[in-house]
Image (cartoon, rainbow, N blue to C red):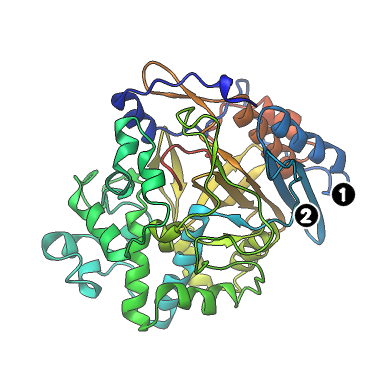
Amino acid sequence: MTSRRFRTPVAGRTLRLAVATAAGVLLAAGTLTAPAFAGTAQDMRPELQQSLDAVHEAGMFGIYSEVRDGDQTWRGASGVADVDTRRPVRPDMVQRVGSISKTFTSVAILQQVGRGTVELDAPIGRYLPDLVPGERGRRITVRMVLNHTSHIADYIGPAFPSLLQGSTKSLDDNRFRTFSPEELVRLGLAATPTGEPGAVPGSYSNTNYVLAGLLLKKVTGTGAEQYITRNVIRRAGLRHTSFPRTPLIPGPHSKAYESWFGLIDPPRDYSVYNMSWAGTAGAIVSTMDDLNRFYRALLRGELVGAAQLAEMQKTVPVQVGGGSVAYGLGLYALDLPCGRFWGHDGAVFGMGTQSLSSPDGARQLSYGFNLMKYQRIDDNGQVVPSPIDYALVDHVLVALCGDSAAQAKASRPLFLPLPTDTAVFR
């Protein structure tokens, strides 16, 4: 794909609308069917690789994926990690996984719930009275923070103000800037709330999960990133997952190309970036193999108790860009024509990731790619899905629904959140 594909207005109003609009939507019309999965990961190897190649052929620079079916595993990659050298992508590359970090943070909080140091329905002001004082601190509960019904505004706009003005200058200004979590939370709290505490539908906000990290620090006496590393990442046996200590991505990785709807032409590499702006809401790096290991361990009760996992899977509708997802505590449910899947997606500057698992953790997909905001925006400021988006959904359906993918494509329209959300990361 070349930058000539983009036709993006640069007016401030258009970009403001784009920041609040999801592009991860699909899709097909027809009658509802509910086929069970047919075909193992080994049986589907040609179709899996073909669907991955189709994403690259649609314009994605590089994509890598891992599918698990019980004890069988398929790994594939297509495209390039560096558009200049043509270095190919590999399935084992380390990726910035963005808001998939929220599941890790939520697991850490639910561990504390299991130990009795945190109550889900207690007011957040009980734990952080100086940060969330007064009526807001009394009305917003820990549960509301984790399921995005706190209606605390997102800090992304205030932290990257040029993005609301038709310019990407903030991306470069903040490349090596260090944000403190308290600063990010205060930016979100200072902005106009998106609704009343507890109101449904909720409104997705990264501020919630930076606040959750501060709650974790308060009740454990340990920095949130250190606690999550010791009690979630290591407990799950993940060898390539971490909160990087520098702006560099540790281990073999792709470059991270950001287009921001054509305003950055050609797309610019943001693989070197200070991720303090994301913190416990989105700063983790991982591999596709580690992500599948993590969600399998979580769904099989190896990281939190049964009661805590049940709380994580109590969902409410939460508005994310242009659609609504069934969001629990740090993970969401997707009902595909072949069944329900749990997981999360994430999008940072230049990298997108999604990880989905069947309820028993048997059937899994994790994939990542290296070009973001490749879509165009229409005159009304709405993001127009790209051929890449449709190809990504095809890969998801082939990976998770197997031989039923053809039937899945003929089913009713689906809102499928992809890691192409224009709200920077999810």
The quadrant holding residue 414 is top right
Q: Name above or below for residue 384 compared with residue 392.
A: above
Q: Name above or below for residue 111 compared with residue 20.
A: below
| Circle 1: residue type | Gln
Q: Nearer the viewer, residue 317 or 52?
A: 52
| Label ID, residue 42 | 1
Q: Name above or below for residue 404 compared with residue 296.
A: above
Q: Secondary structure at mark 1?
A: loop
Find residue 292 and report its horizontal and vertical position in percent. 67, 59
Give the distance between the C-alpha atoms of the residues marked 2 and 1, in whole angstroms: 9 Å
Find residue 18 and report its horizontal and vertical position in percent. 38, 30
The quadrant holding residue 252 is bottom right
The answer to whether residue 36 is seen in the rendering is no
User: Residue shown at 55%/51% (left/top)?
Assistant: 271
Q: Secondary structure at mark 2?
A: strand
The quadrant holding residue 179 is bottom left
| Label ID, residue 69 | 2
Circle 2 packing at 10 Å, graded few (<14), some (14-19), many (20+), is many
- Lower sequence index among marks 2 and 1: 1
Instruction: Left or right? Give the position of 43 relative to 324.
Output: right
* Furthest residue in direction top, as rendered: 379
Q: Nearer the viewer, residue 30 or 290?
A: 290
Q: Is the Cβ of the residue at disc 2 closer than 8 Å to that at disc 1?
A: yes
Q: Nearer the viewer, residue 254 or 383?
A: 254
The answer to whether residue 341 is seen in the rendering is yes
Circle 1 packing at 10 Å, graded few (<14), some (14-19), many (20+), is some
Find residue 156 and report its horizontal and vertical position in percent. 34, 47
User: Residue shown at 36%/18% (left/top)?
Assistant: 380
Find residue 340 and report its horizontal and vertical position in percent. 60, 47
